[in-house]
Image (cartoon, rainbow, N blue to C red):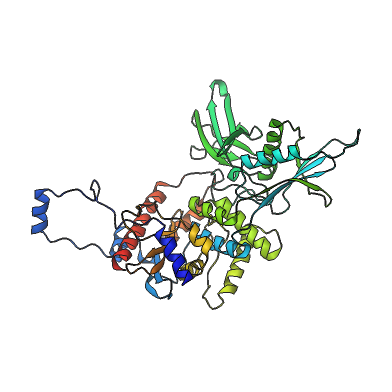
Amino acid sequence: MRRRSLLLLALAASLALAAGPLAPGASAKSPQTKSQLSKSKSTPAKAAPTPAEAIHNLGFAQSDVGYILFDVQSRRVLLEQNADQLFLPASVSKLPTVYAALEILGPDFRFETTVYRHGADLYLKGGGDPSLDSTDLAGLVTQLKAAPLQDVSVGGPEPRFFYDDSLMKRLPEISSKQPMAVAYNPGLSALNVDFNRVEADWELKAKGKSNFRALCVADRMILPAPWIAFDPASDDMLGQMPFLYKGSQSLDRWDYSPYIEDHGSTFLPVKATSAHTALLFRDLAKVQGIKLPMPEPGVVPADAVPVARLESKPLADIVRELLRFSNNLSAELVGLAASRNLTGQALDLAQSAAALTRWLKERELKADWRGYVLANHSGLTPDSRLTPRQMALLLTLISEDDALMQAIPGLTGDGHASLADNPRGLIGKSGTMDYARGLAGYFLAKDGRPLGFAIFIFDRAQRAVLDATMDVRVLEPSPAARGWMRRALQVDQVLLADWMKRF
């Protein structure tokens, strides 16, 4: 009964799907004219296309679309199509990631970032906190300023400043198969700040001169990051390739295209995340009157003394924001924390995702997990696969997790409307990549039963061509891929509207 009550509470608090899209220019309450009334009397209403007909009319083969609709309590399948076929889940992968993390770590788990002192030396040690921002770092500096000073002998060695990111492997990006200059594909390490992205703005001047700057942007603070360098590209870069990464583990540097606009701004990912976080900490310390040398990598000595510590918000709150904004960095860091708890090791993303998959399969040994692969924790990869039936099982498990059910957002975008339009409590998680679309979640049947669903749309042939020819310097999807996605979103609407009408 507790699980049913939880589901009903989560669904009732969510936002819901509109019964169906309106015709262009129409209003839900627009009156009919006399001619429209006369026409409706003389011409029988044309029957709405079936879901299969709608899928065909939208230009998809039936094999491109897989779905399952089921009763969450009894696990009885109500409708299905290609339910045992493998699809690319994209960001729907975040649901099994956060389910495993909450079960393994607990909803009250908190990440830690700590400053240690060892003699005259300072160490900034990262704990993989995905929510750390510039304001938090400023708070650490305030604690440091209030801490008692260590006795340092006159004539001793000059104080040094180290950053310790040894808790995790340092990675320059989430996926090497995604565009390098998009903010949703940053680097990651045990030290991350402001979601590892900076705002770059620029103005190109006469005679080849330019004015570029990078800004660290937090909710209550904007700070310059002058250590991020910008140079004109030596190679001929096309207009679709505005920035090319030329940095290292200790310095982010970007080449910019000669075809870039004369002035503008964009968000760029941070790749050298540990050094970037340490440099920002150093600048924040300077503001508060603490002079630190340039940071360098190092490991905290066993006898170092903690002088400042910051705890993140609880994992349950991090997960809520992660799902709401579909943040890739947060998903990867949460998944890595869970696998580290399981294995005691610092793993790369593929190894970590495999560890959580093994844990999941051991919980449901009798399930058919054939073909199930999550290549990372966020879904930002073309290499993950799962079936609608496997997703249905995951949704059943998720329905038993209080913290996660409360974190799943209402589906208000992608053509979905508000609770006032249709009180069916639709909640869930969507995912999109070029030629791949997923949507999984819950809504209430007419009799109040919680129903779960998973919808996946995948053009395998076009995705294979894209993967074989992808140029990671190009930022934007092709017009064909954008058109495909618009049609895929309509498939979601057609199926959900039909199911809500029938059940």
Residue at coordinates 51% horizontally, 50% vertically from top-left? 470
Image coords of residue 80 (percent x, y) = 38, 71
Instruction: Identify which residue, 503 or 263, lies in the foreground.
Output: 503
Compared with 397, 166 (above or below) is: above
Rendering quarter of residue 247 = top right
Can you name the residue that lies furthest to the bottom here?
A: 366
Q: x, y percentage for residue 105?
A: 63, 62
The answer to which of 104 and 268 lies nearer the viewer is 104
**What is the number of callouts on the image?**
0
Residue 177 appearing in the image? no
At a point 64% along the width and 46% down the height, the residue shown is 192
Measured as percent of width and height from the top left, residue 411 is found at 41, 55
Q: Is 291 left, or right, of 24 in this rendering?
A: right
Query: What is the quadrant of the C terminus in the image?
Result: bottom left
Q: Nearer the viewer, residue 166 or 471?
A: 166
In the displayed structure, does residue 328 sit left or right of residue 435? right
Q: Quadrant of residue 218?
A: top right
Q: Is residue 330 visible?
A: yes
Q: Is residue 98 above or below residue 209?
A: below
Percent x, y of residue 170 = 68, 50
Residue at left offset 39%, top offset 63%: 443
